[in-house]
Image (tube, grey):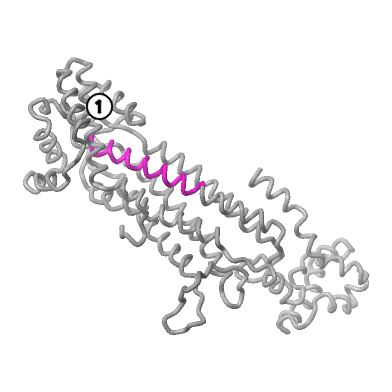
């Protein structure tokens, strides 16, 4: 994580103070439950909450100093809390193991992070929908393999993105549910030294579900699924970013990122207006996806636990969520301010002499009684003349002059196959499917 690609609300989730606050709540709620079960005195739980109510400041530096000696972060934290609370603190952590604290805390942090990501997604979806409706019937060329194919609308391009990110939102919600589990089961997960009711109490207080079998750690298949979802979201971000980048190429220039007053595109060439934001999004997407493979590899831990996953998650938890949060916000801004050029879209549509209507003529010839193979050959031989003339020739006029075509279709019938509106007759249906 670097500040350049971070936003404060997500960063706060991963700051030590928030982590230690969650640790304290886990320990204090567990002590409450232990007191209710008669395992520890009620005064122990009361002492913890009383201290927290009057002096909730966490001295991160002091805890770090203790850890420098103990070489154990949870013990360092417990030692520091005991120094603040006094003798009653000895009843903290009864029957618990460090993973109970660490894994449950990570679950809380990831659910907090996901709540922000879902809100980010809602903002992005709103921006895409606004622009999609604005350009619902703005004609543009559809491309396959980067080559002109048939007409679409710019609104349809954005409707596709909306549908894709809607699926991503659903996946984020599912990933949140997958990761939101609590483990307070003690060493090797047997509950030998702590009652399962403690786990249930802590889970309820923190808004988590209980982990059915925690084997001392929460199984990492949950985390693998979570980070895989973040990777899919990142790939969807890149897909839309690349579309903008292609459309901004000088030879295309159908849309471009907003270029603010005073902005500079190049230190050497004053004329440049570069798609720097969407290029940046491609890079950020790569970084989010880089967390997926380590998360997958974390699933295979030794026996009931090891800590090979720990260092990985200290990286990928903050980095992936912070980066994705920033990327979603950046993409929302790009779409919201995107400069769109319908005139250039029409110019590009017309550039290749009507080639984009070739399929309609092909189908008309088959309907008129010519075999598909012969129809294809007839249309293609005329289309190649247009292609080789770089659009200087007109496909419509060449077809009118072609004896094989003229024998089956009148000039008016040929002209009718070049009607642009024909391609948009089901746009309403598509939008109804996407937006309801």
The residue segment tinted magenta is 101-122
Residue drawn where x is 46% and y is 69% of the image: 276
Whether 38 is drawn above or below 172: the answer is above
Does residue 87 show up?
yes
Q: Is residue 115 magenta?
A: yes
Residue 121, compared with residue 56, is above or below; it is below
Quadrant position of residue 45 = top left
Expressed as whole percent of the image width and height from the top left, the position of residue 171 reads: 48, 43
- Label 1 sits on residue: 29
Q: Quadrant of residue 220?
A: top left
Instruction: Provide residue 75's location: percent of width, then percent of height.
Output: 12, 38
277 lies left or right of 408:
left
62 to the left or right of 153 = left
Element assignment for label 1? helix
Q: Quadrant of the N terminus?
A: bottom left
Residue at 51% in and 49% down? 123
Asked if residue 360 lies left or right of residue 61, the reply is: right
């Amino acid at each position: 994580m670097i500040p350049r690609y971070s936003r404060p609300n997500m960063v706060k989730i991963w700051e030590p103070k928030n982590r230690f606050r969650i640790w304290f709540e886990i320990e204090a709620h567990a002590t409450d439950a232990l007191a209710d079960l008669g395992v520890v005195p009620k005064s122990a739980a009361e002492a913890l909450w009383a201290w927290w109510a009057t002096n909730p400041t966490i001295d991160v530096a002091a805890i770090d100093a203790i850890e420098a000696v103990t070489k154990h972060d949870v013990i360092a934290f417990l030692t520091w809390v005991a120094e603040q609370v006094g003798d009653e603190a000895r009843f903290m952590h009864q029957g618990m193991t460090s993973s109970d604290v660490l894994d449950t805390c990570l679950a809380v942090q990831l659910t907090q992070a996901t709540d922000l990501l879902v809100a980010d997604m809602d903002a992005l979806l709103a921006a895409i929908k606004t622009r999609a409706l604005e350009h619902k019937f703005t004609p543009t060329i559809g491309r396959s393999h980067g080559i002109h194919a048939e007409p679409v609308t710019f609104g349809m391009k954005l409707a596709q993105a909306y549908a894709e990110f809607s699926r991503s939102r659903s996946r984020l919600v599912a990933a949140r549910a997958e990761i939101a589990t609590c483990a307070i089961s003690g060493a090797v997960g047997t509950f030998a030294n702590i009652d399962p009711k403690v786990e249930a109490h802590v889970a309820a207080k923190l808004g988590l579900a209980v982990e059915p079998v925690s084997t001392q750690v929460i199984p990492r298949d949950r985390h693998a699924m979570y980070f895989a979802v973040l990777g899919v979201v990142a790939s969807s971000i890149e897909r839309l970013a690349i579309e903008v980048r292609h459309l901004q190429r000088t030879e295309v220039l159908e849309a471009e990122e907003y270029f603010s007053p005073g902005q500079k595109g190049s230190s050497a060439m004053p004329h440049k207006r570069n798609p720097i934001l969407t290029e940046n999004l491609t890079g950020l997407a790569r970084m989010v996806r880089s967390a997926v493979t380590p998360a997958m590899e974390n699933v295979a831990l030794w026996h009931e636990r090891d800590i090979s996953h720990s260092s990985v998650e200290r990286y990928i938890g903050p980095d992936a969520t912070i980066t994705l949060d920033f990327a979603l916000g950046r993409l929302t801004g790009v779409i919201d301010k995107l400069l769109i050029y319908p005139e250039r879209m029409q110019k590009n549509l017309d550039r290749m002499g009507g080639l984009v209507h070739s399929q309609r003529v092909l189908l008309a010839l088959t309907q008129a009684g010519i075999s598909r193979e012969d129809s294809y050959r007839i249309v293609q031989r005329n289309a190649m003349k247009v292609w080789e003339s770089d659009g200087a020739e007109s496909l419509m006029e060449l077809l009118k002059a072609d004896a094989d075509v003229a024998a089956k279709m009148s000039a008016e019938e040929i002209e009718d196959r070049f009607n642009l509106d024909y391609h948009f007759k089901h746009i309403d249906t598509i939008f109804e499917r996407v937006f309801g």
